[in-house]
Image (spheres, rainbow, N blue to C red):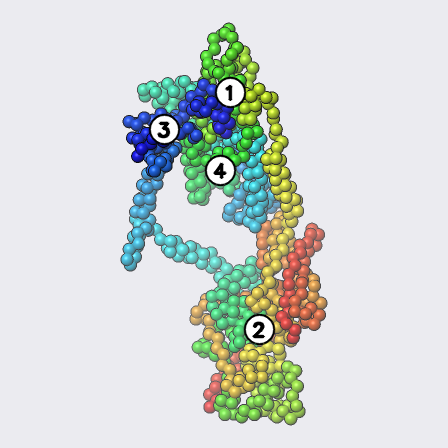
Amino acid sequence: MTTLIDNTQEPGKREQAAPGVQRSRAPNPTPSTPASLYKKREQIYPKLAHGTFRNLKWLALVVLLGIYYIVPWLRWDRGVGQPDQAVLIDFENARFYFFFIEIWPQEAYYITGLLILAALGLFLVTSLFGRVWCGYACPQTIWTDLFIYVERFFEGDRNARIKLNKSKWTLSKIYKKTAKHIVWLFIAAFTGGVWILYFHDAPTIARDFFTGHAPTTSYVFAALLTFTTYSLAGFMREQVCTYMCPWPRIQAAMIDEEALNVTYRYDRGEPRGPHKKGATWDGRGDCIDCRQCVAVCPVGIDIRDGLQLECIGCALCIDACNEIMDKVDRPRNLIAYDTDENVVRRSKGEKARYRLIRPRTIIYAVLFAGVGFIMLGALIGRTTLDLNVQRDRQPNFVVMSDGSIQNGYTVKVLNKATQTRALTLTAEGLPSPVIKVAGQTDLTLNVPSDEAVDFRVTIVEDNLDQIGGRAEILFRLTDPASDTEATRSAVFVAGGTK
Amino acid sequence: MTNDDRPDVTDDGAPRYDEPTGQYTTGHSWDGIEELNTPMPRWWLGIFYASIVFAIGYAVLMPSIPLINSHFEGLLGHSDRGEVAADLVEMRSERAVFADRLSGTGIDDITADPELFRFSMAAGKSAFGDNCATCHGTGGQGFKGYPNLNDDVWIWGGTFEDIRHTLEVGIRAAHDDTRFNIMQGFGQDGFLTRDEINDLADYILAFSGLEVDAEVQQRGQTLFADNCASCHGEDAKGDRSQGAPDLTDADWLYGGERADIQTSIYSGRQGVMPNWNERLDPEIITALAVYVHALGGGEPSLPAIVPASMDDSAESEIVTDDTNVEAETP
């Protein structure tokens, strides 16, 4: 992406990120002090921004954290003996409950579908608006934002924090730091604690957790998430995005010249420089080099260097710059959601062009809709009764004493309904079958609610001339009570001619 | 190394700025191939060292170093085998609930309780695979000389009680009350000549539809009445109480070809099944009986059809009979 900017420059000036802007990230090594192979962490002190995007981010933070913390407490009536938690991942009984949906292990393809949908959704959004996921919705961003809010509450804004960190240890500094870490730890523990509520009945596990009766895994996971929340949001922050997360690398393949990204419009901003009130704006750019965009940046980059790997697309620099533009009485959006191509076009004197609908976005949208429809269809067509039939292979068939042929089958019935069902089993396709269910005298299969039961079924057929060596048969399971049925085709093997 | 053609590469191995990438090099140069310096964060190095420390600690605490005859067991004394053993103990105690309910119950009690029935089927299938499949096949399909357990042909009876008893005492096994009879080698022992055996075999095959001429039929009938009918019955339908198979049905344990039948008459058949009462727990034998009974050929043990008391007494009588037969056989 940066090459686009460089291409507009004279070849000799390529060290400049934008006209007049020296690249500042790479160290400047000399032979006497060779460049280190390891980079020292530079502490970032993001300044509080004010404006549309900051408000949007606050809103996203409240809504998403609200969902995370409140959802396990929502109840959903599923009948007697069934969990009444709206969202529950029940590992012990191998069920996943999501409001009216109940997923069995063999239906894990719903989860696969959901993940595919999430990935395609992410592709689509990224190709349209860049890294909005990273900037607004990623848990790392959300919790970091929350932790920085706490930090700011106790230690003050950017300059105060820089000053505090450089100052000697005083009682006041000890108080501020301790209070911050206590609140951080409290939030982290709360986050880890809520995590386990998704895997057990929330009120029960919450009580068991504090009385010491919860399973060990609950304590382990609560501790683990407390640790990760505290360390990743409190200390690691932008390092997670820059060095640990693979998503920024993948996204580079989704973003193109026409994707809307947080962009510094250098065509309008350059040449930059300090501006005195009342001085003319002729012959210079709108950027007054106040570095507010750098001060608010949570990943510590200068957006004026162009699109960079570290940029999480949080748009806080847009807010910061707009505030300044208002003050100096210039039009807003010197930094804005814009495309690389438009910046180039404008600097060449061409008109800006926005193309949200382009082959890439169309493909992602079609794929997204396609998978979505398939998922929806699968969900609507989902039955509460499932029948699987497995024929014995050893023996393939059995010759009875009177010369008739017997085949054995394992009939697996899944009852996903909330009540016990008495189902009637029939098999079609044979002239005179004698069907038997092992251990019972009738053909009624009783399957308790929410269970999968195996039945051993044998079929004896004596009219062998009529079927030849092999016959296609159809097992049919009917539920007289709810008028539903399930069928499964199978084979009856009679060997060669007798 | 000279760099007359590359004025930007210095001789002293100093890093240089690389224009296309906007990065510095490490200063290393091998035949003009240079390495860009993309510095790792220093904490990453810290995690690397921490991992080494963890690995050392783990190796000290957990079983790690192989020795010649054993291995270093670690300070924590962890053992995967020990955990499996503990899990097995726990699993057995969980299953004991079912095992208790299985011992001493009849088939009616078991089928009346679907949960117990399913447990028996699962336990029976597993025990069958471990103990019975070697001879009877994984699905109980049987082989020549080893009965198919899926069909309705039962030499010693096909009710749940019969099957369970067979499992317990075995056939011609070491148990005192084992199911016992003798199908002697009529040719081998000099009772019948080759011609007589041929006639007899044809006569027996005639029950299954072989066309034989009247003379052979006549000779065969006499031979059968003299030698076979005492066990297999006048009509050759067999006698379960003596473990004498039905010779008229479609099932042949040792093969239904003329040569197979001739061999059976000539050398006799003395198939053995071990008595399992010493090797398996009673509840496992019950589960096995439930499983085999459910394979397809199990017969109902309704008192109206097979009176249990009569059956028992008949059986014990036969055992005495068999012993006598054995004593009398030269």
Dot 2 falls on a residue whose secondary structure is loop
Q: Amino acid at mark 2?
A: Gly
* Residue that mark 3 sits on: B8
Q: CA separation, marks 3 and 1?
A: 30 Å
- Quick check: B109 above or below B25? below
- Of tags 2 and 4, the one toward the viewer is 4
- Residue at mark 2 shares a chain with residue at mark 4: no
Q: Along the polypeptide, which appears first: circle 1 or circle 4?
A: 4
Work out whether residue B312 or residue B232 is closer to the camera in this orientation and state it.
Answer: B232
Q: Is residue A187 left or right of residue B211?
A: left
x, y percent for residue B89: 42, 57
Dot 1 falls on a residue whose secondary structure is helix
- Quick check: B172 above or below B101? below
Q: Which of the chains bears the disc numbered 3?
A: B
- Of tags 1 and 4, the one toward the viewer is 1
* Residue that mark 1 sits on: A266
Q: Amino acid at mark 4?
A: Trp
Q: Is residue A219 left or right of residue B9?
A: right
Dot 3 falls on a residue whose secondary structure is loop
* Residue that mark 4 sits on: A195
- Residue at mark 3 shares a chain with residue at mark 2: yes
- Quick check: B104 above or below A179? below
What residue is at 66 percent from the left and 86 percent from the top? B211
- Residue at mark 3 shares a chain with residue at mark 1: no
Q: Crowdedness of circle 2 by 10 Å Cα count: few (<14), some, many (20+)?
A: many
From this viewpoint, is residue A212 visible? no
Q: CA separation, marks 1 and 4?
A: 45 Å
Q: Which of the chains bears the disc numbered 4?
A: A
- Of tags 1 and 2, the one toward the viewer is 1
x, y percent for residue A470: 65, 67
